[in-house]
Amino acid sequence: IKPTILVTGGAGYIGSHAVLALKDAGYGVVVIDNLVTGFRWAVPDDVPFVQGDIADQPLVETTLRDHGITAIMHFAGSVVVPESVENPLKYYHNNSAKTRDLIDSAVRVGIPHFIFSSTAATYGTPNVEAVREDTPQQPINPYGMSKLMTEYMLRDVAAAHPMNFCALRYFNVAGADPQGRTGQSTAGATHLIKVAVEAALGKRESVAIFGTDFATPDGTGVRDYIHVSDLAAAHVLALEALMAEPDRNHLLNCGYGRGFSVLDVLDAVDRATNNPIQRIMAPRRAGDPAALISDNRAIRNAFPWIPQYDDIELIITHALSWEMVLISRRIGSSA
Ligand code: UDP
């Protein structure tokens, strides 16, 4: 019988995919989510659900003990970069301070393994073609800084207490469960593929292209888009690595190691629907690097991770399918 994992933020986008990956692999799963941005319906009916805050230590510690939890996968947090610039204290509260309390609860209960959603935003604007894990981390916004602080906390706690951890630094996560069980549902999305599929399906009039004068082949920003289900699979492998080698921690990029420009993405969405989206040239967004591409050799060496969906057309097809589910259920429409 496989252990039971507590998934924080399991009602959210990436967390809900991790819940499915864990269940599909035979693990027990318990979700805690405060439902500020998540959806109760995104959690399968047979998964115990605790509505509450990760910083509610009595609630978290009771949950950890009652369910005999072996590891925490921590997805709960705030994720909008421009919002973090406007409201940094929200990010230092939700992402850093509350995570400190969650880690404290984990230590008090003696949870041996912790898996953390970190981000390529911890690298800032790296001056390299492909970002390695030892590329200097110099965040350029409070979001990236709030996540980097948690990496530091985990490193220090793992050295002081019987816990090991894995921080996965996500590149640009997109797509949806290929079986259509969950997807990205939050209203008011700002991420390119989500915005583009909303426009393609008539939920928005147009897509703004934030900057056409970057030092990239076509002048638009280049990113390493990774399918959310490959990312979820990496979390299951991280769990298995932490259990197999309790003295070893991992800090790993999670991307495919290749990039697509904004125009590449919009062209692919247009091809998928055979109906061109209206494009509007717009100025650069504050703090956007020209290109952000992972070097993913470290995760491929550390885990038997074999991406299944490294295909921009497939990522977009799955995102479109999920958007159609949302439209039919009348949920998640945005501005
Ligand atoms: N982008 C864009 N229009 C949008 C949203 C994003 O041109 O409506 C661009 C953005 O400037 C960047 C890329 O798409 O070059 C990916 O941005 P996103 O917000 O998806 O992720 P980020 O890389 O900022 O985390």
Image (tube, rainbow, N blue to C red):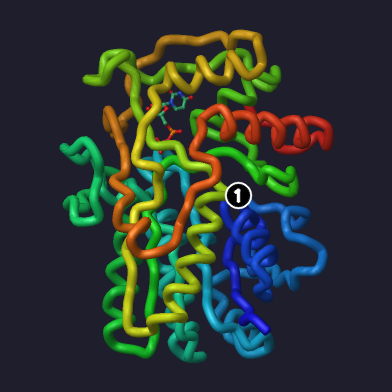
Quarter occupied by the C terminus: top right
Q: Is residue 273 above or below residue 255?
A: above
Density class for disc 1 (Cα within 10 Å; few <14, some 14-19, many ≥20) is many
Q: Residue at x 34, y 41 (%)?
A: 257
Determine the residue positioned at 48% across, 91% down. 110
Q: Amino acid at mark 1?
A: Tyr
Task: Say left or right for 177 vs 75.
Answer: right
Q: Position of residue 30 (x, y in %)?
A: 67, 73
Left or right: 52 with respect to 189? Answer: right
* 155 horizontally vs 273: left or right: left
Q: Position of residue 196 (x, y in %)?
A: 57, 23
Disc 1 Cβ-to-ligand 1 distance below 8 Å: no
185 or 132, nearer to the observer: 132
Ligand 1 resides in the quarter of the picture at top left
Residue 258 locus on image (x, y percent): 35, 35
- Residue at label 1? 13
In percent of width and height, residue 252 lies at: 34, 59
Report helix, strand or loop for mark 1: helix
On screen, residue 237 versus residue 31, left or right, reads left
Location of residue 219 (image quadrant): top left
Q: Quadrant of the N terminus?
A: bottom right
* Residue that appears at 75% across and 69% down: 47
**Residue 60 in view here:** yes
Identify which residue, 63 or 27, lies in the foreground: 27
